[in-house]
Image (spheres, rainbow, N blue to C red):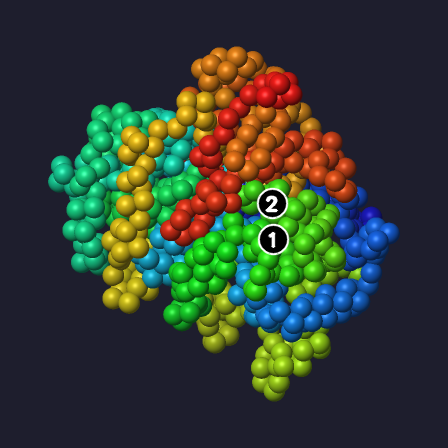
Amino acid sequence: MTDIERVHHRTCHLCEAMCGVVLRLRGREVLSVRGDDADPFSRGHVCPKVVGLKDVLDDPDRLREPLRRTAQGWQTVSWESAFDEASERLVALQRRHGKDAVATYYGNPQVHSYGAFLGGIEFARALGSRNRYSATSVDQLPHHFAALAMFGHQFLLPIPDLDRTDFLLIIGGNPVVSNGSLMTAPDVVRRLKALRARGGRLVVIDPRRTETAQLADTHCFIRPGSDALLLLSMLQVIFAEGLARPGRLESMLTGLDAVRTACAPYTPTRVAEATGIDALTIATLARTFAASPTAVCHGRMGASTQEFGALVQWLVQVLNIVTGNFDRAGGAMFTRPAFDLVAMSKSPGQRGSHARRRTRVSSLPEFGGEFPVAALAEEIDTEGEGRIRALVTVAGNPVLSTPNGRRLEAALPQLDFMVSIDFYLNETTRHANLILPPTYGPERDHYDVIFNALAIRNTAKYSAAAFPRTATARHDHEIFSGLCRGLARHDPSRRKRGLAALTERWLTPRRALALGVRFGPHGAGWNPFARGLTLARLADQPHGVDLGPLEPALPGRLLTRDRRIALAPPELLGDLARLETRIDPGTVEPPQTLRLIGRRDPRTNNSWLHNSTRLVKGPRRCTLRMSAADAAARALIDGQSVTVRSRTGAVTVALEVSDELMPGVVSLPHGWGHDRDGMRLRVASAHAGASINDLTDERYIDALCGNAALNGVPVTVTNATDQARM
Ligand SMILES: Nc1nc2c(c(=O)[nH]1)N[C@H]1C(S)=C(S)[C@@H](COP(=O)(O)OP(=O)(O)OC[C@H]3O[C@@H](n4cnc5c(=O)[nH]c(N)nc54)[C@H](O)[C@@H]3O)O[C@H]1N2
Ligand SMILES: Nc1nc2c(c(=O)[nH]1)N[C@H]1C(S)=C(S)[C@@H](COP(=O)(O)OP(=O)(O)OC[C@H]3O[C@@H](n4cnc5c(=O)[nH]c(N)nc54)[C@H](O)[C@@H]3O)O[C@H]1N2
Ligand code: SF4
Ligand SMILES: [Mo]
């Protein structure tokens, strides 16, 4: 049996693009991975990272059994004793200090596995702590914030209709490298080229001339953090010149006049200096956007993880709406996914919430039941009633991925107990008392409950596991249920009885998925003879099914109380006062200050693919890029070692002089810094790099929603060898 070669089709789970892949297998071995030409959505496309499907699977450093930290080092333990110890300790700490004494942090890959996603919801419920954190608040929280305020649900995220638009304005996104975000679009390069081939235009606003900017018709440098000013001023031009034409949307809006009034002071001349974009360019951009037959503005990471992220994501949609480019082909549209999370979470409590409570130390607002992760370290290391005593991390590496990682790193040993669900002993999990390693991608079945909902076409695909998990391995959801069972064992008050207990046992993630698909908008429903989707029918279509382009969905899809789009939510209008301080010439910085921004590389995936030799080999990637003018002003030369300093720390890296960078801005990729003590990732340690989040600042946030401002951090850069003299 093991000699026989098989072919297996699935979806790559590594990023948001959902590429179809073909694995050639022999037994449990993956012989090769390539793109699936028959996948109607990705049409054979894959990126270099796809080898991560095989390399992580085969990685000798990948954990395969639970580990327990002892005075003598790491010891393997059985699953049952790991579940028992973890739940006993968690229950004991919660009894003593209250349920909130145990915090959770869910990282990015959790949303790339439906089992981890659905199981994670169950576990959080069983734990009952309000101290919940996730990668959302170092990523797309401003999108959820704007969606809740404008459309009435945190997950009603408008997606750019990439394949049909005539004008794509990208603010702070680099899809050519990231493969698209909040815009699931496999083979995005081909789609961007197709846009230009059909006479459309691509405009990129970014402080770096990125790989995407290089494909664009126009690229404008912008000073980090000033995008809200740019958008306000584009809107000012559009209103002042009578170019606002919301069309059929007009009857579905509230607040049009309030927005017009709010934008009025932001003339292009007034914001030109603060944004670094001249007034004529701003006015022309506004006019061309408004005049285009269809157009769509898409703001992503760089526009989100900055001081005014929520304002930006709001104004992006205001721009789309007032120009009539919303809920219509070629504009920003809502998806209608086969597993429709929005339809399933319509109760007021599930739609999202803001500032129902605040963090203990810095009073940061809750959003959607979570606190901003920028507050995690101080909630652990600040003494007093309500301190976090224990932490459960899932699929995350917050020491490298959240602002001021050094502070979090120092805080973790102060915990009484820590559990990590992860198959790597990484910069974060090495502080855990117990590490519970789940199965990896191809070992489990797959359906994208999140990314199908963010895709530029409605699609659905279910992939079986490439091979069954081994008897000693556990899926994420099995780990969660092992922990839930343990919590109930050690605390009988959490035990479910009767129907609730039966439902809990019966409703596995797979059954929840199957029900969601069957009763979703494309589902077969109760009738076994009806056409329409079921999980079983999807399983028979290993390349996935195309459910067509995005379709207008308004006003039906809106979940605001008055069923209208709130164009001028008071909390966002109110935040303009904070922005106003940024155009004030009184806030000029010392001339040596530079603004630090992030960067992604085609061969990395946040912090966790650096243990693949194939992916990390080649030229050094963790370099500080700086414009020639800034380098000359500091007498720095290409290739030399430089020290970058911020309020929170310093790192030393190689300098790369590059004409890509706007003068005054430097860029360092995130996810590196694998030189921490006690690391076991052999390949990654040899390519350690430095962590940008040793420089980012937990106090530098978007004060409205609490998202970390990872971009635009003030830093200084000096010759590393000068250090001794300073
Ligand atoms: N290869 C690779 N692909 C990935 C990932 C990865 O690590 N590697 N990570 C995945 C994840 S988790 C995500 S969320 C997505 C993110 O996908 P993208 O949003 O496309 O992310 P980035 O490539 O970081 O692009 C952000 C851009 O914003 C710019 N920027 C920084 N500050 C500002 C600013 O103030 N204003 C403006 N206008 N621009 C600014 C940066 O220069 C950068 O080009 O990528 C995903 N895909
Ligand atoms: N300065 C700066 N910081 C950033 C960013 C930036 O652009 N600049 N980007 C931010 C963004 S967009 C994101 S999403 C975050 C990501 O930050 P995090 O989500 O905190 O971390 P990752 O680096 O994605 O690490 C994921 C971990 O999950 C594990 N893992 C992988 N698959 C699975 C699985 O199926 N189950 C389990 N249990 N574990 C798994 C991996 O081994 C790895 O340890 O980083 C953020 N941090
Ligand atoms: S683009 Fe994303 S989904 Fe496609 S192969 Fe690369 S990592 Fe996988
Ligand atoms: Mo992300």
Residue at 36% of width from left, 58% of height from top? 148
Residue 583, compared with residue 27, is above or below; it is above
| Type of the residue with mark 2 | Arg
Place of residue 404 in the rendered image (x, y in percent of width and height, measured from the top left)? 56, 42
The quarter holding residue 134 reads: bottom right
Residue 670, compared with residue 13, is above or below; it is above
632 lies left or right of 489:
left
Q: Earlier in the sequence, mark 1 or mark 2?
A: 1
**Which is nearer the eye, 131 or 256?**
131
Instruction: Name the residue carrying label 1.
Output: 381
**Which is nearer the eye, 692 or 566?**
692
* Residue at the far bottom in the pictured view: 498
Classify mark 2: residues with Cα within 10 Å, few (<14), some (14-19) or many (20+): some
Classify mark 1: residues with Cα within 10 Å, few (<14), some (14-19) or many (20+): some
Place of residue 128 in the rendered image (x, y in percent of width and height, measured from the top left)? 57, 70
82 lies left or right of 169:
right
Instruction: Name the residue carrying label 2.
Output: 407
**Which is nearer the eye, 20 or 488?**
488
Residue at 50% of width from left, 65% of height from top? 517
538 lies left or right of 95:
left
Is the shortest distance between ligand 2 and the CB of mark 2 under 8 Å?
Answer: no
1 and 2 marks in contact (CB < 8 Å): yes
Q: Quadrant of the C terminus?
A: top right
Residue at 58% of width from left, 61% of height from top? 384
The quarter holding residue 439 reads: bottom right
The quarter holding residue 304 reads: top left
- Number of numbered discs: 2
Q: Secondary structure at mark 1?
A: helix
Place of residue 623 in the rendered image (x, y in percent of width and height, measured from the top left)? 59, 26
Q: Secondary structure at mark 2?
A: helix
Q: Quadrant of the N terminus?
A: bottom right
